[in-house]
Image: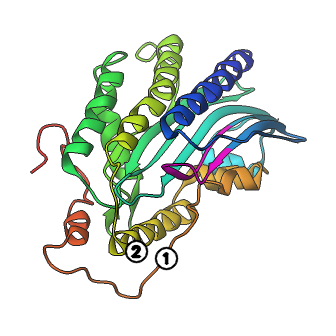
Amino acid sequence: MEKIKEIAATFSELQGQICRVLEAADGKGSFGKTAWKKDIGGGVTRVIENGRIIEKGAVNFSFVQGDFSEKMESILGEKAGKYAATGISSILHAENPWVPTIHMNVRYFALDNGVSWFGGGIDLTPSIIVPEEAQRFHQHLKEICDRFHPDFYPDFKKWADDYYYLPHRDETRGVGGIFFDRLKPDDKYPFDVLLGFVAAQAAAYPEIYAELMNNHEKPYSEREKEWQNLRRGRYVEFNLLNDRGTKFGLESNGNTESILVSMPANASWKYNYEPELGSFEANTLNRLKKGINWIDNID
């Protein structure tokens, strides 16, 4: 657990860097800054609202530590007395339905029994899937992964397909990305490699989204906006029913407002909705599948 303060300092610096890049790309909105503290530690919640492009978003940093409860033991399958955890979690929802929602998380978890691991990932959730855009997004992620280990992209891409999936809907949350958890430093993945990888991922995240923001400086229809809200409903379903980070954050007595700030400003549900065959809505639903090779096959 001795390295966690150093990692927390790195993550704190990255939080500020991410916010600066996103503010410049948006050109109007700015991130507020709210520090929070509990008996388990604290963090900084940074929220942006009503920007030129970003309707609502957050870049949160936390560093917490405390007793490793029986509930945590059952969730994580580890035995320990104390734990410490630090990370950055970010979510960005755009006003324009053509600009995707994006999520990024990096974290480090350590126990007083000597066990520690990294986790995180980036995933993209377009309301309207543009295959060429998904291709470029995955190419960005592959380039980051390949700098650190040749297995990272194929392994973590599949992991994301399986994780960002709504089993009750039989559809993926979006076009996926990369996801990894419980990566314990060892001979295959040395500590410095894993730390460098998560830091590079966090640093690239706002640059990737700045590119996506600039791709869609165009008007949208009421129909496209209604569809965006329906897709946001799916996002809410995943966060509340399937997301392990949300569940662990609430279980560990984290800051509730910071945990739930990932929700979109608006979302909707429509009973038994069936899109018209051949419509952009139907085309998007048809692409919400596991195992799509977005880099080499986007037909």
Q: Residue at x 30, y 23 (%)?
A: 143
What residue sits right under mark 2 in the picture?
Answer: 226
For mark 1, give the secondary structure: loop
> On the picture, is 65 further left or further right than 120?
right
Query: What percent of the width, then of the height, locates residue 216?
Result: 33, 48
Q: Which residue is outermost to the bottom?
A: 271
Q: Where is residue 271 in the image (x, y as percent from the top left)?
A: 41, 88
Q: Position of residue 210 (x, y in %)?
A: 42, 36
Could you tell me if the residues under marks 2 and 1 are in contact, i.e. CB atoms within 8 Å?
yes
Tag 2: Cα neighbours inside 10 Å, few (<14), some, or many (≥20)?
some
Is residue 181 in view from this perspective?
A: no
At horizontal 77% and vertical 41% (from top left) the residue drawn is: 68
Which residues, given as a range, are shown in magenta? Answer: 47-60
Viewer-closest of 17 and 162: 17
Q: In this view, does 271 lie above or below 51?
A: below
Three-letter amino acid code at the position of disc 2: Glu
**Residue found at x 75% / y 39%:** 33
| Label at residue 268 | 1
Residue 178 appearing in the image: yes
